[in-house]
Amino acid sequence: MSSTPHSIPYDVIVIGGGPAGVEAALAAGRQGAHTLCLAINLDNVGFPPATPILIENADDARAGLFEDLEIIGGVLPALVRRQEVATESVPPGFRGRLLVDRRHLGLAYKEAAESAEGVMLRQALATAVESVAVAGKTAWQVNCSLGERFEAPCVIVATGTFLGGSVNDAGDRIPGGRRGEIPANSLALCLQNLDLQLVEVKATSNPRVDSRSIPSVSELEEISLLPDGSQLHELLVYDLKPAGSRLEQLSEIRKAAGAGAWMTRASYTVRHLVLEGGQVNDDLESLLRPGLFFAGRAAGSCNYTEAAVLGVVAGNRAAERATGATPLNLTSNTKNVEKLCDAIAGRGQRPVTVRRPDTGC
Amino acid sequence: MTKSGSQFKRVESHFDVVVVGGGHAGCEAALAAARMGCSTLLLTLNLEKIALMPCNPAVGGVGKGQLTREIDALGGEQGRNTDSAFLQMKMLNTGKGPAVRALRAQTDKKVYEDNMKRVLVSEPKLKVLEGVAAGLSVSRETVNGVRLTDGSWIGSKAVVLACGTFLRGNVVVGDLRFPAGRMGEPPATQLSESLAENGLELARFQSATPPRVDARSIDPERMQVDPGDSQPEPFSPFSRVDGREQIPCYLTYTTERTHDVVRKYLHLSPIKSGSVSGKGPRYCPSIDRKVINFPDRSRHPVFVEPEGLHTRELYLQGLTTSMPVWVQEKVIQAVPGLQTARLMRPGYAVEYDYIVPSQLRLSLETRAIRGLFLAGQINGTSGYEEAAAQGLIAGINAVRRLREEEPLVLGRDQAYIGVLIDDLVTKGVDEPYRMFTSRAEYRLLLRHDNAHERLAPIGHGLGLVSDSSMEAIQREKSAVDSLLESLRTTVFQPSEEANKMLSSSGSSPISEPQYAAQLLKRPGISVLDLLSLMANGGAHKSSGGATDGVVARRAEIEVKYEGYIARQLADISRKAALEHTTIPQDFDYDRLQGITIEAREKLSRVRPVSLGQASRIAGVSPADISVLSVYLHSRS
């Protein structure tokens, strides 16, 4: 059964409502595409789940990419300039870094997605994409877990860490895109059955500590702590990703931060599937499955800025393909964007954009 | 040898109180325990979801508003937090008696969550931890810790379980069922087993939530605007809410056409097809249930409520459903005003384990395990207010248990909170319990306007209400008392001025001197009418000075309803004997001759603390009470 009888057909469907998915949906909407963005949980739309760091310092390769992102129409730079999103107090040793309040950035992304002309946000868990013929043309049908079905000529997969995701819980692995959130497992199988080459990578989260339990942050020598959220007053432990059980992690943190340190969130690892390099063209469209685009972590990005850039590129290109709109020039004046897309497409070197890369990038 | 494992376990962290669950019950419990001076840990599956409002973006309402007000009076947080996050505030039933007047607020969900989070972490003795409880550590029928799924243990002297809908939760939509505590979130699977192992009886309930639609896709022209009060009154007397901009809700109604759509697809409803295990709430029924149960009603109201200032999601109160998503879309589009509405989130039901509440004491401690307290939906209630009220009491009593002090048990004549807990423990539940004013036999005494007078002294005694707040509350009470005194002693002469005021209010003139209070009992006469008359010197004695509106309204209620209030007080006196006749906790009902088998069973299960509580148990008749009473008195 298809969705609403009154619906105008969609031009682009974005699977995934994280930063990449939202940027893709917004970009497609700007190009006049009637766009549907599907997120497993609308409370988490646009939520940057990892660190609050957008840019390490002025020399960070992300800085150039961040500027390019704004040039090609990404909304992240504008959102970050909002008062509640930019982190107020940046500890010494982190000056020059661009830090965000992750919760408020998520809420700002959600607001942008819900207000954009031509963009519809909807809570649904995509379980499959299948090629269908609609009025003599091929299109993609996205099937969802509660029986919902949506069709569009172009689909953008922006599943973040959720595709075939599993999280560890003291030695056991349980399904999860993040701790406490269910993953997209059926979709993973489906994409594999479409002969798309997926590879498993992992991402490790940083532990968080209660800021009240650290007497003097600036005096710590062995670890750095970053403010991470105005609501729960947590500090993200930046350069330590302790392994092992919660207690082992706590013990390691206490060695560096004092016996009174209290860890509010232990580090954990999420394993998930991403598209192997070299399977998309410059437009981030699958070489094997036309009309299927990839963005964000699912395409191989390593940080929010890269994810956003890929989202904007995929969103624009998918919209242009679906509606016949004039293609935007996204690379002539934005060399960093060009380099990133080249790398994702399997040509050229990956630009080094993280000082301490996650495994899998 | 503990029931939950005999291996040596390293306990790295110790707390006085561990609260499992960061919802409305959990937050109140954790705050109360920490504020009373105990080291407290709030353990939650997901720190981002603390104080989440998964259903209605509203706090309060008839019955519920009284609970929230009482939570505030005792020093709990829900009232204040609602005041900080409201989008619209309304006093309901202003045209009816004061017993049913209740405050209701629409809230911005995200602001509510953020503010509660900040309050939690500003409590010095409160820590939070993201983790999953897998079991309890119990030794000699006393809880001494919580085991997490990561294998670690947290030691504690008392535990409050406030797990909401997460215990072996399943989401149900149409004929689809899958494990989840809420949509998109995995359930808690191990804790139920631990509770059952420790002798607790579990049962299943279900709760459902309506769809959300995109605000840009509704047709407001075809709906009525439902605004807030022009002068919003907060839950807490200390909140500043003047000048706060309110946003309206919309009201529409289903039509016969809507009902036809529901009936056409009723066979796909999990309620009808029986695929949902567990009873659902009667008083917050799904639209499917309403159409089945009320076939003669030609329309049902649908309130269209914003979920926040910065989101386009609209909550459809009155269209709760767990029918297949495509049916939900058809039903919504058959409602005037929603004919082009786009679904953002589908409605769904969640089934979950709850603990049969007759296993609790009136303190919310389980009888089976010392130091284990339960609060919220886990006890078979529905609603944020019901949950928060229990959380507050559970947190307070966890601390009282540690200190070997008597628990706080509020009577049915003292608070709605008392009614709530007494109903749960004494009468049990066969569907999720929701508070109504009709549940409170002494509702004329348990009013919104006198909640702080009744309960703040208790909160103050516990250390949850500050000295300055207490003083302010006492000052208001003194002002009310002094105004009452004034009204009861001031005499109005049958002057031209007095009679002019009376007739302009539609009341008959007086020919003999009358006390002000006597005149106030007349319908149509307000205390403000009398005060202005008194100020103009039309009376033997004047009250002097300006009188605060709140004080005036309180005094007016006391006078106008004096007769009814006196009757309720007399009723309480008469029943006091029953309430104060205690029954030993180890009383052997098998020894009692002359009571029915059912009564024997029920009394043994509930183990009432008093004859009064015994009389409220379903299946225990007045004759049974008589027998028990005679027995107890002959033994004393």
Image (cartoon, coloured by chain):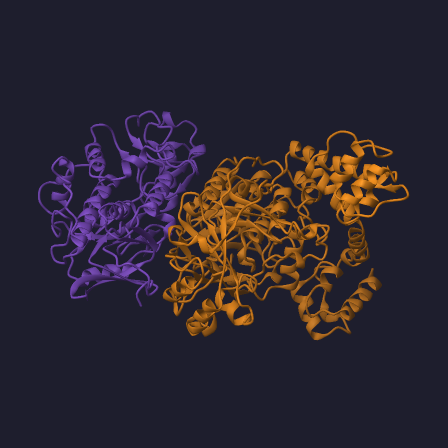
Question: A124 and B121: which one is in front?
Answer: A124
Q: How many marks?
A: 0
Q: Quadrant of the C terminus of chain B?
A: bottom right
Q: Residue furthest right?
A: B512
Can see residue A238? no
User: Which residue is drawn at the image coordinates 38% and 45% (left, top)?
Assistant: A246
A284 displayed left or right of B198: left
Question: B604 and A357: which one is in front?
Answer: A357
Question: B70 and B328: which one is in front?
Answer: B328
B245 displayed left or right of A179: right
> The chain drawn orange is chain what?
B
Quarter of the image for residue A110 reads top left
Q: Residue furthest left?
A: A347
Residue B283 sits above or below residue A246 on the image? below
In percent of width and height, residue B300 lies at 53, 63
Question: B29 and B477: which one is in front?
Answer: B477
Residue B636 sits above or below residue B309 on the image? below
Quarter of the image for residue B502 reads top right
What colour is chain A?
Answer: purple
In percent of width and height, residue B304 lies at 47, 54
In percent of width and height, residue A64 lies at 19, 32
B286 displayed left or right of B526: left
Can see residue A150? yes
In percent of width and height, residue B632 lies at 80, 63
